Image (tube, rainbow, N blue to C red):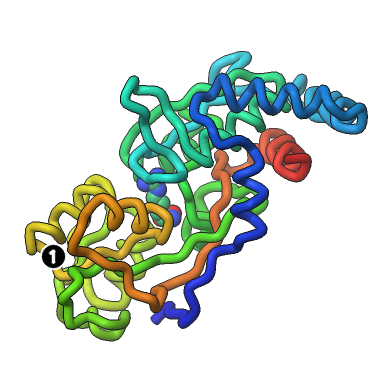
Amino acid sequence: MKKITALMLSSAMMLSLAACGGSASTDTASSEAASSEAASSEAVSTEEAASADAAELTTVTAGKLTMSTNAAFPPYEMTTDSGDFEGIDVEVAGAIAEKLGLELQVDDMDFDAALLAAQNGKSDIVMAGVTVTDERQKVMDFSDTYAEGIQSIIVPEDSDIASADDLTGKAIGTQRGTTGYIYCTDDFGEDNVIAYDDGLTAVQALNNGQVDAVVIDNAPAKSFVEANPGLKILDTAYAQEDYAIGVAKGNTALLDAINSALEEL
Ligand code: ARG
């Protein structure tokens, strides 16, 4: 069982991501990145290096960096009331696109479809709080890690489930195609794990008593629990993992450009 005892986010990483900008739209992310580059001549010269990389980049749509995602995963990606995309991944992707001299295009779809889109070259990158796993590394390439994720367990406040071990024999809700689903089916058997289209639907099923617990990444877990009184996140985490940007296997030009942009950010 992939279990760890301490609940701990990489605060340094979160801080540096927060520094990318707190506000919403892709445009804002780009212009913030542009103005911080203009502020330092050192940054300007590294940007020249990055756009030199970009000159050799072939993307799905010329002049654009197409990102597939599942925008139901706050605070990494979500939609605003007006239908724009926002969140940490959108901000970071916007800043990378800016460094590469490209315009960010966000394509929202189911999580498993977002992974496939990048694998099949329908999108340039998948950025969706994607955990690096051995299985995924067989079918796609990953950038350097940009954040840490934790698989958390959400239960009703009065639940008798106090740790991952207690999930044995319980009905567990997860999001389809995620590591939460994969780990839980491995550990507790397919019959006990229900896959929902997105995390919020799984949490609603928990609210309705259709499942006994939901296993999902800690950051969206916090936001779903905040919005749904009567639920709590267990203190013991289920698994700790690394998030990275996925690209089609063998697309080293794009991967190198992304990694240098990430390093500068
Ligand atoms: N980190 C998990 C995984 O890679 C879940 C990611 C879900 N992301 C999303 N945008 N819905 O499987």
Quadrant in which the C terminus is drawn: top right
Name the residue at 21% across, 54% down.
228
Name the residue at 15% across, 61% down.
206
In front of the other: 92 or 242: 92
Q: Where's residue 94, x and y in %?
A: 59, 29
Label 1: few (<14), some or many (≥20) within 10 Å?
A: many
Q: Is residue 9 left or right of residue 222?
A: right
Q: Is mark 1 within 8 Å of ligand 1?
A: no
Q: Amino acid at mark 1?
A: Val
Name the residue at 48% across, 73% down.
7
Name the image quarter holding residue 116. Answer: top left
Image vertical order of residue 176 relative to residue 156, above or below: above
Image vertical order of residue 64 relative to residue 29, above or below: above
Image vertical order of residue 99 relative to residue 20, above or below: above
Image vertical order of residue 8 relative to residue 135, above or below: below
In front of the other: 249 or 10: 10
Q: Where's residue 9, x and y in %?
A: 54, 64
Q: Is residue 95 left or right of residue 204?
A: right
Number of numbered callouts drawn? 1
In front of the other: 178 or 92: 92
Name the residue at 60% across, 45% down.
18
Q: Where's residue 82, x and y in %?
A: 34, 20
Look at the numbered disc 1 and give the secondary structure of its residue. loop
Name the image quarter holding residue 62. Answer: top right
Q: Where's residue 199, x and y in %?
A: 28, 51
Quadrant in which the N terminus is drawn: bottom left
In front of the other: 197 or 230: 230
Q: Which residue is mark 1?
A: 211
Which residue sits furthest bottom?
A: 165
